[in-house]
Image: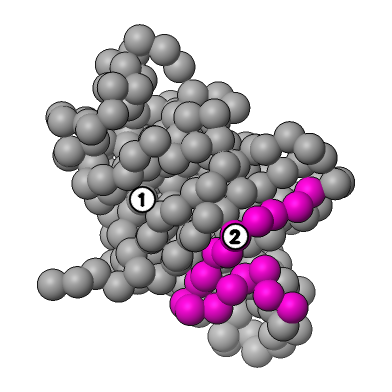
Amino acid sequence: MMKEAVIRVRDFSYYVGSRPVLKNLNLDVYKNEILSIIGPAGSGKSSFLRCLNRLNEEQAETRIEGTIEIDGQNIYGPDINITELRRKVGMVFALPVPLPRSIFENVAFGLRMAGIKDKKLIESRVVDSLQKVALWNEVKDRLHSSALKLSGGQQQRLCIARVLAMRPEFILLDEPCSGLDPVSTMKIEESLMDLKKEYTIILVTNNTKQAARVSDRTAFFLSGELIEIDRTERIFTAPRDQRTNDYISGRFG
């Protein structure tokens, strides 16, 4: 059965000034999959995520070539509403940044910014989002206490919940477990396995073991190029490119 490609990247390059950060990328992302992107520092992994919701444009002197289509629409086309794009393609960064507000208001923040005033709707979205990241049982009795009192792992799950409250279709995760302990990492990975039933997830990770544990497919980036993309099992057992094998076996990176 053919899988549905919901993101199509074609001949896509991204430049900062005259420097190419991403070079002639061609890949598809399938609906309800977890696609991991691995590669050494400086390989363009995070830049690629930022190109998917046009956060790349916040940097000066950038330009792109080629196309990225999401749900059949060129996201760099003239008729794109960038605010709506970023709601649809939510992003979570490596360092959790909870707002200096209550746990409840952290999750509700985007909804309020979007002009939603229905208290019952906001409350149901907050509860649902916290449940989806397995945080509800840990915080349900202190929703109105400061989010800054949460542990690092809880703060990261809170930031994921804040994205989920906006009902995105896609979740971009930029090394979400890089500073977390093994128990917190496990909780986030378990949440991702559940979340992919409803969302399409792209996970940038420097932890190849994490990619092997959670992703359906894995892409290997090197120096701004896509070296190969395949089922995760194949990437980690029989990669087609020697450079992929060298990276996952620890010879560099």
Which-is-in-front pick, marks 2 and 1?
2
Q: Is residue 68 magenta?
A: yes
Using the rendered image of the protein, determine whether residue 124 is visible from the camera's viewpoint: yes
Instruction: Pick the residue in front: 67 or 104.
Output: 67
The amino acid beneath tag 2 is Gly
Using the rendered image of the protein, determine whether residue 152 is visible from the camera's viewpoint: no
Q: Quadrant of residue 114?
A: bottom right
In the picture provided, is 219 more to the left or to the right than 253? left
- Neighbor class of circle 2 (other Cα within 10 Å; few <14, some 14-19, many 20+) is some
Q: Quadrant of residue 196?
A: bottom left
Q: Position of residue 179 (x, y in %)?
A: 53, 28
Residue positioned most to the top: 251
Q: Is residue 97 magenta?
A: no
In the picture, the disc for residue 66 is: 2
Indicate whether 100 appears above or below 242: below
Instruction: Pick the residue in front: 73 or 107.
Output: 73
Residue picked out by circle 1? 35
Q: Residue at x 68, y 75 (%)?
A: 77
Q: Which residues are magenta?
A: 62-78
For marks 2 and 1 on the same chain, the one whose residue lies earlier in the sequence: 1
